[in-house]
Image (cartoon, rainbow, N blue to C red):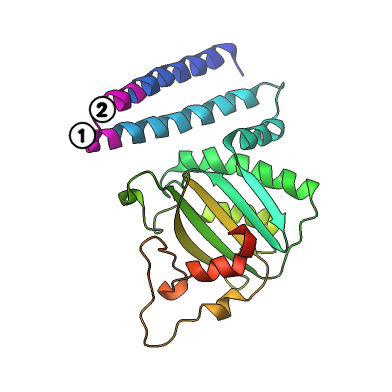
Amino acid sequence: MNREILIQRVQSIAKDIRILNKAVENMDVTNIPLVLENYKDFSAEAAQRAEWVAIRLRHLVYVLPFTPKRDYLPQAADTMGIKIEQREGMHELTLPGLMPRRKSTRGTEFLIDPLMAALERFAREHGVVRFPHYTVCFVMVYDRTLPERRIRDYDNLELKAVLDAAACFLMESDSGLLCDAYHSTELGETDCTRNVHRGQPVLSAMVRRTPGKAPRRTKLGRGEGKNGVQILPIFRFYFGTLW
């Protein structure tokens, strides 16, 4: 890369970091109970700008020959706390924070690139068994110390990109004929997203909705599968010790 262009990009990132610092300072001095809307705006601006800064800094790492992208991204996955486990026919991905909305392309790149690198490393280092049929559950875990009004519905979350990444290394296919997908919400110690896969076509039969009966719901469960079925208790049974 041309030296002047590189300097301009570094200066642009430095400017964004100063703006990020200002947004965080605004969060720090905002009276949250009285000015909740302002805090919401400041925190969203800070998070989005931080993601964009991280992405552009990664790109600066790649432009020089010292640290190839394939070498850096696994380190980024470790730093972010992306975890992948395999046991007894199941895979579990733990991702930091909650999934961004679909329109947040920067947030998706921030997460998916390191996730792909972590999956590639995991598949290379472990004997991954690809089952012909998968049942997948996305579990959105919300920090229980924060207000429940933070809990969102599943309509606009960027979950498909995570499933596509997992399918490349852990699944035969994410076709609807081979992969049943469900969603659930829990309260936990910290915000995170868990993506649990099980390679047995058992769950579909277990959650058939009884004709004429409304789906059951619980205050903290909010776990819905296809046709509005309440599936959280079933998943706890089905996924056993990983739950």
Residue assigned mark 2: 30
Instruction: Determine if the magenta segment contains residue 25.
Output: yes
Mark number, residue 35: 1
Position in image of residue 26 (x %, y %): 29, 24
Which of disc 2 and disc 1 is earlier in sequence? 2
The residue sitting at 25% across, 27% down in the picture is 30
Q: Going by the image, does 110 lie left or right of 134?
A: left
Residue 183 percent location from the top left of the image: 48, 62
Q: Quadrant of the N terminus?
A: top right
Looking at the picture, tell me which residue is in the foreground, 108 or 146. 146
- Per the rendered image, the range of residues in magenta is 24-40
Q: Residue pushed farthest bottom?
A: 211
Image vertical order of residue 34 relative to residue 127, above or below: above
Report helix, strand or loop for mark 1: loop
- What separation in Å lies between label 1 and label 2 (alpha carbons)? 7 Å
Contact, CB < 8 Å: mark 1 with mark 2? yes
SS of the residue under disc 2: loop
Q: Is residue 175 visible?
A: no
Circle 2 residues within 10 Å: few <14, some 14–19, many ≥20: some
- Residue 208 in percent (x, y) is at 50, 81
Q: Quadrant of the C terminus?
A: bottom right
Q: Is residue 22 above or below residue 112?
A: above
